[in-house]
Image (cartoon, rainbow, N blue to C red):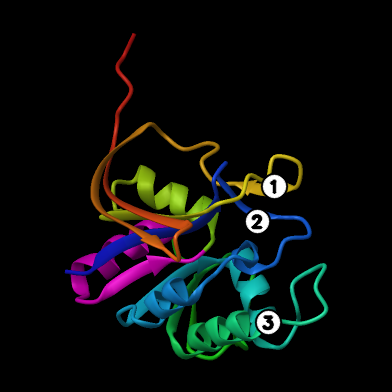
């Protein structure tokens, strides 16, 4: 059976990105980048918006507000290009241009449920906030990992990660600090069902 990891990179205030900030908020260091390179083989799950953005990066389009990729960002995109990717979308059409990408028009929750039951490797989300919310709400997420960068993006932050989430109890199963400033926390989530009033 496969294990499903929801994996987020955030500012301290829970934003996935911020206007004018580079990837990793420009604060990635050698420990963090080394750890990224040690990750096991994974199949990435994403929605159409994340696919459009990331495949654009893979085709050489720099993030908005930047003239070009930094070497660390380019290496990360290259690694994603080599990985298996499953894209859930009702708007995208075949053929997908990003290498190793499979398009699925079927319901994401049911498809991932079958992938977990019939697979043996690690499944991990990338971006795709609404997909993550749906998979968590359906009780399919085994591990919930957040890497928090030491910035607050109150004025420029975008893509608030936890808006619309159910209440979730989190049991910490791992934690680590990279480069003396980046904090990883990993949890086993339990979605709390609201009590009838």
121 lies above or below 163: below
Is residue 28 one of those drawn in magenta? no
Left or right of 1 on screen, residue 64: right
Give the label, 1 or 3, closer to the camera. 3
The quadrant of the picture occupied by the N terminus is bottom left
Q: Residue furthest top?
A: 197
Give how far across and how far down residue 187 sits, in percent: 28, 49
Mark 2: few/some/many CA within 10 Å (<14, 14-19, 20+): many
Q: Identify the disc placed on residue 70.
A: 3
Name the N-terminal-most of marks 1 and 2. 2
Circle 3 crowding by C-alpha within 10 Å: few under 14, some 14–19, many from 20:
few
Cα–Cα gap, marks 1 and 2? 6 Å
Instruction: Tell me how far mark 1 sits from mark 3, CA to CA.
Output: 21 Å
The magenta stretch spans residue 113: yes
168 is higher (above) or lower (below) than 44:
above
Q: Mark 1 = which residue?
A: 157
Question: Label 1: how many residues lie within 10 Å, few (<14), some (14-19) or many (20+)?
Answer: some
On the picture, is 159 further left or further right than 86?
A: right
Q: CA distance from mark 3 to mark 2?
A: 17 Å
- Residues under numbered marks 1 and 2 in contact, where contact means CB atoms less than 8 Å apart: yes
Secondary structure under tag 1 reads strand
The C terminus lies in quadrant: top left
Which residue appears at 54% of the width and 59% of the height?
128
Q: Quadrant of residue 60?
A: bottom right
- Find the magenta span and give its range: 108-126
- Give the residue displayed 19% in from the left and 76% down from the top: 120
* Residue 17's disc number: 2
Asked if the residue at tag 2 contacts the one at tag 3, i.e. Cβ–Cβ closer than 8 Å, the answer is no
Q: Is residue 48 above or below residue 102?
A: above
Q: Is 139 situated above or below 66?
A: above
Q: Decide which of tag 1 and tag 3 comes sooner along the chain.
A: 3
């Amino acid at each position: 059976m496969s294990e499903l990891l929801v994996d987020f990179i955030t500012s301290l205030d829970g934003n996935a990105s911020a206007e004018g900030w580079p990837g990793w908020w420009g604060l990635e260091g050698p420990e963090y980048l080394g750890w990224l390179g040690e990750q096991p083989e994974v199949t990435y799950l994403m929605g159409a918006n994340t696919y459009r953005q990331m495949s654009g990066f893979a085709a050489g389009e720099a993030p908005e507000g930047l003239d070009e990729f930094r070497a660390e960002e380019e290496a990360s995109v290259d690694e994603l290009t080599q990985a298996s990717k499953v894209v859930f979308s009702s708007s995208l059409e075949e053929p997908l241009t990003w290498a190793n990408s499979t398009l699925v028009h079927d319901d994401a929750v049911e498809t991932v449920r079958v992938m977990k039951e019939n697979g043996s490797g690690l499944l991990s989300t990338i971006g795709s906030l609404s997909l993550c919310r749906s998979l968590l709400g359906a009780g399919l997420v085994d591990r919930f990992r957040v890497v928090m960068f030491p910035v607050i993006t109150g004025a420029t932050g975008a893509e608030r990660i936890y808006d619309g989430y159910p209440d979730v109890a989190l049991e910490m199963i791992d934690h680590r600090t990279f480069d003396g400033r980046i904090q990883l926390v990993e949890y086993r989530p339990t979605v709390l069902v609201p009590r009838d009033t």
